[in-house]
Image (cartoon, rainbow, N blue to C red):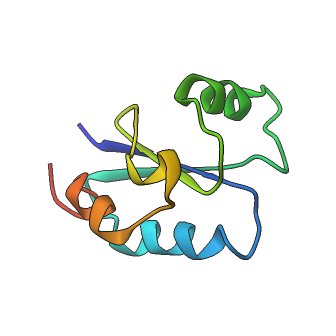
Amino acid sequence: MKRQIEVFTAGCPVCEPVVKMVKEIACNSCEVTVYNTIEQCDSKVCIDKMKGYNITSLPAVAVNGKLLNCCKDRGVSKDELIAAGIGKAM
């Protein structure tokens, strides 16, 4: 089973380094999905997921259905991404 990583972005210069960092440290056991909220997906799944996670600022990262603590009020940190298992085999 792969680790499900969801990255929520506005496609802006602040968000893109986070997308790049997640992709760089992700491993074969990680499945990364990037939701660009500016482009909005046809099915609106990205907006529904944002509401479900209660995301109030971007960028934000969820791992296995749980919004990382760093994304709740302070921004994404590499240490928390690694602590969530991104980059480690399952």
The residue depicted at 18 percent of the width and 61 percent of the height is: 88
The residue depicted at 34 percent of the width and 64 percent of the height is: 26
Looking at the rendering, in which quadrant would you find the N terminus?
top left
Question: Which sits in the foreground, 84 or 41?
Answer: 84
Left or right, 39 with respect to 34, comes to: right
Residue 62 visible, this orientation: yes
Measured along the vertical axis of the image, is residue 5 above or below residue 47?
below
**Where residue 23 sits in the image (x, y, percent)?**
45, 68
The residue depicted at 35 percent of the width and 70 percent of the height is: 78
Left or right, 43 with respect to 49, comes to: right
**Where residue 42 sits in the image (x, y, percent)?**
83, 32
Left or right, 84 with respect to 76, comes to: left
Residue 6 visible, this orientation: no
Question: Which sits in the foreground, 70 or 65?
Answer: 70
Outermost residue on the front side: it is 73
How many numbered marks appear? 0
Residue 43, picture quadrant: top right
Question: Which sits in the foreground, 54 or 64?
Answer: 54
**Where residue 62 sits in the image (x, y, percent)?**
44, 43
The residue depicted at 25 percent of the width and 63 percent of the height is: 82
Measured along the vertical axis of the image, is residue 9 above or below residue 68?
below
**Where residue 64 sits in the image (x, y, percent)?**
34, 36
